[in-house]
Amino acid sequence: MGVSSPLVEAFEVTGGNRLSGTVSVTGAKNSVLKLMAAALLAPGTTTITAVPEILDVSVMAELLRRLGCEVDHDLVTATLRIDVPEQLHHQADYDLVRRMRASICVLGPLVARCNRAEVAVPGGDAIGSRGLDLHISGLNRLGVEVHNEHGYLIATAHDRMQGASIWLDFPSIGATENLLTASVLAKGTTVIDNAPREPEIVDLCNMLVAMGAQIGGIGSATLEIHGVDRLQPTTHATVPDRIVAGTWAVAAAITQGDVMIANARAGDLEIALDKLVMAGAHIDVGSDGFRVMMEDRPKAVDVVTLPYPGFPTDLQPQFIALNSIASGAAMVTENLFEARFRFVQELRRLGADVRTDGHHALVRGCEGLSGAPVEATDVRAGAGLVLAGLVAEGVTTVFDVTHIDRGYANFVEDLTGLGGDIRRIDA
């Protein structure tokens, strides 16, 4: 897949089909991009497997090429080989960074390797402000000067970074990733307190350890990093995508279907799957995934998003879609991104009864939805609208599906394989 994507494409979804069959989950979008950035820390060839075929991977690959790397993406084997030079470029250009907020994760590795990084202030999903204050203050503690100039975040370490104790006011995933990748080559010990515990953070730590980093407390709220002089390339398999797995789980429930989700870790979705059980689903967990079966109309379930191991914000739109056709009413509370309810106005076009007040949304379940043209405002909102379209009467056309392509590999093909009536069209 190239970096460019057709600008005017849509998904045409015809509702009414019950999903059944097996779908396999690829590596996590929210992990693989950070693993790719971490490869910058070690000259030589790092290999990443279980790489999803999504647009964001192509954008990140192009960004790494501009930094001086050679990147080969084998789509057949889902493998990335990243050949990192001894001398890296240190500027991440706006034309790529604006397309994907995860581009900011090259900041830490570039400062560690080059003592300087110039990264355009990122764009990405329109789900609310996600300031860079924690990135900047943490790097300041490591001895890095950071300032904003002409739309670029410019970070300079005049000498080798020095380990420090860093307390995060909020368990920011992005800030932690940059502080991890910066501090592994710093002098001395760095302690990150109130660190996030997401499986994707654990995945990044495991890859860094395989490269020779010394990190204690992996999976806990306190990470202790003992800096080393140099890291080595490695081969690492990306953790399965829990958000994609959760999306398929909701798709099974909303269509009263029966879907086996392979290569998925139920333990990473404990609260979300428990919510589906409360909605009336039956879930069988196996060694290589889990099966979701729903026989009747779902029951409405309250949702409160929180950092891991709480309910993931990236599954909130899908659950609002589920609640929109459920029996009863539910309150959905969004604690992480203030603009994540933007997609609700699109869901209302399908006939959903959703009222928002600040970071709360009251969803009253309807007997049915009615197909209409809607627009995806971000990756997960797009997925939520498609799920709603699967149960709406008639045809739902979802526009701006580039957002969905950023987070879901083979989305149309996988849904079609489960019996969904969906096709990609030129809008």
Image: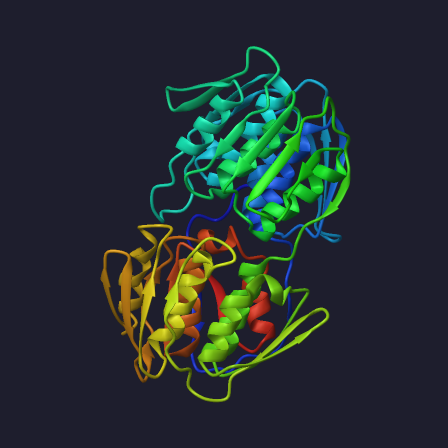
Percent x, y of residue 248: 54, 69
Residue 305 can be seen in this image: yes
Q: Residue at x 44, y 75 (%)?
A: 390
Scheme of colours in the image: rainbow
Number of disc labels: 0
Q: Quadrant of residue 224?
A: top right
In this view, 125 is above or below 384: above
Percent x, y of residue 8: 41, 52
In this view, 83 is above or below 265: above
In this view, 47 is above or below 310: above
State the quadrant of the C terminus: bottom left
Frontmost residue, 335 versus 15: 335
Residue 10 can be seen in this image: no
Q: Residue at x 54, y 79 (%)?
A: 19
Frontmost residue, 15 versus 46: 46
User: In this rendering, would 413 be left or right of 288?
Assistant: left
Q: Quadrant of residue 106?
A: top right
Frontmost residue, 114 versus 126: 114
Percent x, y of residue 22: 65, 74
Q: Residue at x 45, y 52 (%)?
A: 403
User: In this rendering, would 209 be left or right of 119?
Assistant: right
Percent x, y of residue 145: 47, 17
Frontmost residue, 232 versus 19: 232
Q: Residue at x 63, y 22 (%)?
A: 186
